[in-house]
Amino acid sequence: MKPTRKISLIIRILQSFFTSWALMKAGRMEPGNIFTLVFFLLCFVFYGYVDNKLAESRPDVSPKTPLVCMITAVIFSTLYLSVDCPIYIETLTNPLFRLGIVSAAFCGFVVLFYYLLKLLFALAGDKPRLSAVLFSGHYDCPPQLVYTNFRHTWSAKRAGSVYAFYLKHTGLCAFLLCLLCWFPYFLYQYPGVMTPDSINQFEQVLGVIPYSNHHPWMHTLLIKLLYDLGFAITGSMLIALSCYTFFQMCVLAFSVSYFINTLKQYRVRPLICLLITLFYALVPYHAVFSVTIWKDILFAAAVLCFGCTLLRTFKKVFRADLFLMGISGLMLCLFRSNGWYAFLLCFPLLLLYFRKKKKTVYPVVFTIFMLSVLIKWPLMNALHVTQPDLVESLSIPIQQVAAVLCNDRALTDEELELIENVVDLTYIKDLYVPFFADNMKELVRAGHPEYLEDHKQEFLKLWAALGLRYPGDYLTAYIRQTYGYWYPDSFYLVAEAEGVSATSLGVSHTPLIRGPLVIKLKEISIKLGSMIPLYGTLWSMGVICWVLIFSIGCAFVRKELPKLILYLPSAALLLTVLIATPVATEFRYVYFMVFSFPFYLMTSMLILPREEDSGAL
């Protein structure tokens, strides 16, 4: 039974009131601020517009769309308030008042996100209109009628020679445009940006220290291969290192090109493809990362390529795509430690999804799995490659236990003795940083980490017991340790590293272009993300996490559940980061997610081909 007009009006007034309350708190305003009235009026009009618009349009969405909107709105509100709500109640002491303020803000955010999602999901479900904006040709035409032949979209005469070339060679143009825009950074940062992590790998390349899988061994071997090749040809350490840097730039640009060509297969308009290419070519952190010698960069390229190969399986599966699936899948497993665990999470679901294409896809998936296992254990053990220690994977549990100790919580004598057998408690309060686990990890390593190794079960029971006894401390420690990856209002200065860290290995920062103008332009380009609204959201890991969640919701709303396989690798990788991150706001740990940001948005809107149009070669 529908509510009467008067009841609907009262409900909308209450919704707008609570939303204006939430926005007032989020904006750090006083109740008498004029903008609280502005928020109320805007919300009142917006909620009425959404209700009326959806009543008229009736988009092609699942009947469960309101439920998906509500679940997603609750997730968004919980993520936002987990970090923000302590500020709302910091001046209040009465528990009832504190609960009331947080509840009012939570209700307001849930209503706001619910209506925003209703509108966005409705737009995503309006396939004919969406197709007219994003795609060439009608959205329901057979996938064979793609615009590979650019004359179906524009005639060569009308388009002009340059645009005609772009229409015909969209992927190649994306590759070249990225390299062209990144090349000044290559010249300025020559032979590449090298942080202490990079120096550690370079020491392994030169044989100064033994091989270790703390930084992925396969990535170190790739650096060594290109370095040795460059050094054999030129005899210069700088040129040899720059060979790897330029190779990394090419791989990153290739992944963009492959993504653009994949969109072209789905008839995405050339202008949209160009805008996506400009995101990669012009947003400066892509350029800086393209010349930074980190494992995370090629890993991000592998994640995007792997996602594109999964997207291409909705159409015909070509041998070249299967080959790239295998290569990118191996990089996914071997170029970051958490990539292997993410692949293990995905493995059974990939087998389940591809059961109808098992003759073509199963061999690739099993090859990725088997080669990864052989490399990670028999091969590395035979070559005496050192594996990361246990402490490296226990960042969050160590931080949670440290938070309990810093809060002077009561522990039994047996619990204290167990902890003291590993670490000296004298320096816990001095070294504990809620957002940074390395201090605690080094304190454990300076103690007796071998005791921790030998008594894993006892420490697991201790960690669980303290968590049950002091859940508030654990939750607070976890939020502080991970908030940067899911809270959308945390800004982190990205890509500010430059040059080569101090080392006696014989390499140094040797810019090929220099001068105060170059330095100032680089500084401004990096800082613009903290100054300009909307553009700044591209620098927020939390915003991109929300986009991933929204894209997953779109798959349910549009009744396109097969699309969930596209987001599975990224979601599994994000989960592994949230389980073991040592730093709360390290952009490069989720650079794979940032690099795949346009992939999430575009796949949420793409029209899947009919079942009979897919196949294999």
Image (cartoon, rainbow, N blue to C red):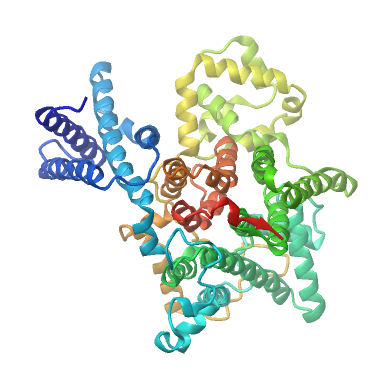
Q: Quadrant of the C terminus?
A: bottom right
Q: Quadrant of the N terminus?
A: top left
Residue 383 x, y percent position in the rendering: 88, 49
Residue 411 x, y percent position in the rendering: 56, 13
Which residue appears at 37% of the width and 35% of the height?
Answer: 63
Return the residue nearer the eye: 255 or 496. Answer: 255
Return the residue nearer the eye: 84 or 198. Answer: 84
Which residue appears at 75% of the width and 28% of the height?
Answer: 453
Tell me, yes or no, if residue 291 can be seen here: no
* Image-quadrant location for residue 353: top right
Tell me, yes or no, if residue 541 can be seen here: yes
Judged left or right of residue 489, residue 29 is left
Q: Is residue 179 above or below residue 361?
A: below
* Image-quadrant location for residue 81: top left
Q: Is residue 223 above or below residue 593?
A: below
Which residue appears at 64% of the width and 67% of the height?
Answer: 251
* Image-quadrant location for residue 247: bottom right
Return the residue nearer the eye: 478 or 119. Answer: 119
Image label count? 0
Residue 533 x, y percent position in the rendering: 30, 58
